[in-house]
């Protein structure tokens, strides 16, 4: 990864922005119970260098999964009792889901947590992939592993707001399509937060 991209990512992490995000951010009429219990989870926002520049590793989730089937997502999942922290969760899940070795990852830091409609509090771990690896998708969870340009996913102009009926009411959400991939929901919301940080930290 070019040094300027790495520096820009680190600057984005250090930028003072609003805190935690939620799938309900664009739906102010939704009132969430104060005593709700969220299950901890983490995802790895892994950026790697390539012939076309810096890219973000994404997955298409298997269609039979209980949560978010067929959606575009970062490698990640719920925190296991043996995980030391959310960083350990993200790294373990990335190894299990796409075969990313721990030794090929340099963790840069944590982005603000994100609450999902399915009751998870997801901590995004921003990292850079330091050497080439061959993705090995776990067939029980991952239908496809692909990369999308960091410049596309962190360009605020690429995002738009769409809506659909969810549990009988309209739900608004961010989308950031790329090629044949419809990136929306929690993944798009996390990327939107990163895009805002990087846009504010432009040299």
Image (spheres, rainbow, N blue to C red):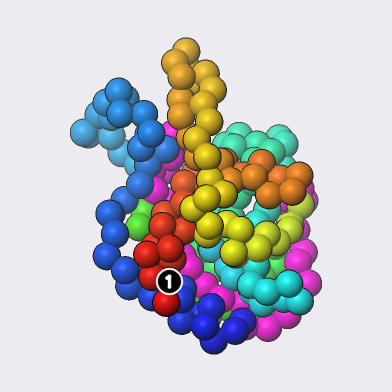
Query: Residue 115: where, in percent of width, then height?
Result: 38, 43
Q: Is residue 109 visible?
A: no
Check disc 1 and report the residue beneath it.
Answer: 202
* Quarter of the image with the C terminus in it: bottom left
Query: Residue 4: where, in percent of width, then height?
Result: 52, 83
The region drawn magenta spans 114-143
- Relative to the observer, which residue lies in front, 48 or 175? 175
Residue 183 picture quarter: top right
- Identify the residue at image location x=64%, y=45%: 177
Query: Residue 166: where, in percent of width, then height?
Result: 50, 21
- Identify the residue at image location x=69%, y=38%: 70
- Identify the residue at image location x=73%, y=72%: 52
Taking 3 as reference, is 32 above or below it? above
Taking 61 as reference, is 96 above or below it? below
* Quarter of the image with the N terminus in it: bottom right
Outermost residue, left side: 34
- Identify the residue at image location x=49%, y=53%: 156
Q: In this view, does 120 lie to the left or right of 56?
A: left
- Relative to the observer, which residue lies in front, 4 or 189? 4
Q: In this view, does 18 lie to the left or right of 23?
A: left
Asked which secondary structure carries label 1, the reply is loop
Q: Is residue 120 magenta?
A: yes
Residue 30 picture quarter: top left
Q: In this view, does 167 lie to the left or right of 140?
A: left
């Amino acid at each position: 990864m070019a040094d300027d991209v790495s520096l820009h990512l680190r600057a984005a992490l250090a930028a003072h922005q609003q805190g935690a995000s939620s799938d309900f951010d664009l739906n102010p009429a939704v009132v969430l119970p104060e005593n709700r219990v969220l299950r901890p989870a983490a995802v790895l926002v892994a950026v790697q260098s390539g012939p076309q520049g810096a890219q973000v590793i994404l997955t298409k989730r298997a269609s039979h999964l209980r949560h978010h089937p067929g959606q575009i997502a970062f490698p990640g999942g719920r925190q296991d009792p043996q995980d030391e922290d959310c960083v350990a969760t993200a790294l373990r899940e990335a190894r299990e889901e796409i075969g990313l070795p721990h030794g090929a990852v340099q963790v840069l830091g944590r982005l603000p947590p994100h609450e999902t409609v399915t009751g998870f509090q997801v901590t995004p771990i921003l990292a850079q992939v330091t050497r080439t690896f061959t993705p090995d998708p776990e067939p029980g969870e991952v239908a496809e592993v692909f990369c999308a340009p960091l410049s596309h996913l962190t360009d605020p102009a690429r995002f738009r707001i769409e809506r659909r009926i969810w549990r009988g009411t309209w739900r608004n959400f961010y989308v950031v399509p790329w090629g044949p991939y419809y990136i929306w929901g929690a993944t798009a919301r996390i990327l939107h937060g990163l895009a805002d940080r990087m846009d504010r930290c432009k040299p």
